[in-house]
Amino acid sequence: GFRDVCMMLGSIAGASISKEVSGFLPSSNMRADLVISDSLTSSTTLFDVRTCDPTKHNSSENICRESAAVPGASAEHEAAGKNKKWRASCQQMGLRFVSLCHESGGRMSQATTTFLDSLVHRSGGSTSDQARFRTFASQRLAKHKYLGRSNVELIFRFAGSRSCVADD
């Protein structure tokens, strides 16, 4: 999934990255989807990865309506919720926290875009090398998006149901 793509990109960029890590927050049973330990800055960043549905209907939050009007609104809404849940606990332990949220259609939260930009920068090399890495990362993320959509289509077709995914 999206977490595995982020992990692969982080590894290629030279980050010391682990997945499904627990124990960083002793007062909690929360488990980070990804952890990057950066020896250059002597910092540790916990990541929670989330794929969100911009068509989610919740009458108290109007995510579907807002997503129709504001590109990326669902991803930003999910990121804000994850930040509220994680950030204070991480700060108490001297850890950084980043919520990596993207919508099922592919739009990413600003924090996710910033994370990918940091991987491009970390990958080093010339401007041309970094452009190639950015293209590679974009292709991997697009592949993930379309494979996910294809799997949803297959599930609904196999079950004999009509697809809930709109045709492009």
Image: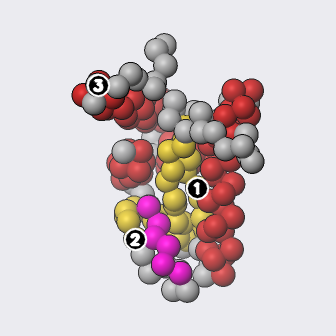
Distance from disc 3 to disc 2, alpha carbons, whole Å, reads 39 Å
Q: Horizontal and vertical percent for residue 153?
A: 34, 26
Q: Amino acid at mark 1?
A: Ser
State left or right for residue 114 relative to residue 119: right
Label 1 neighbour load within 10 Å: few <14, some 14-19, many 20+: many
Label 2 neighbour load within 10 Å: few <14, some 14-19, many 20+: some
Q: Amino acid at mark 2?
A: Val
Indicate yes or no whether the magenta region holds residue 20.
no
Residue drawn where x is 29% and y is 25% of the image: 160
Q: Horizontal and vertical percent for residue 6?
A: 42, 48
Asked whether the viewer can see residue 108, the reply is no
Answer with the quarter of the image where residue 67 lies. top right
Question: Considering the image in quadrants, where does the N terminus appear?
Answer: top left
46 vs 131, nearest the viewer: 46
Instruction: Report the span colored magenta.
Output: 28-34
Residue drawn where x is 52% and y is 66% of the image: 46
Residue drawn where x is 49% and y is 53% of the image: 49
Write down the residue under mark 3: 160
Write down the residue under mark 1: 99
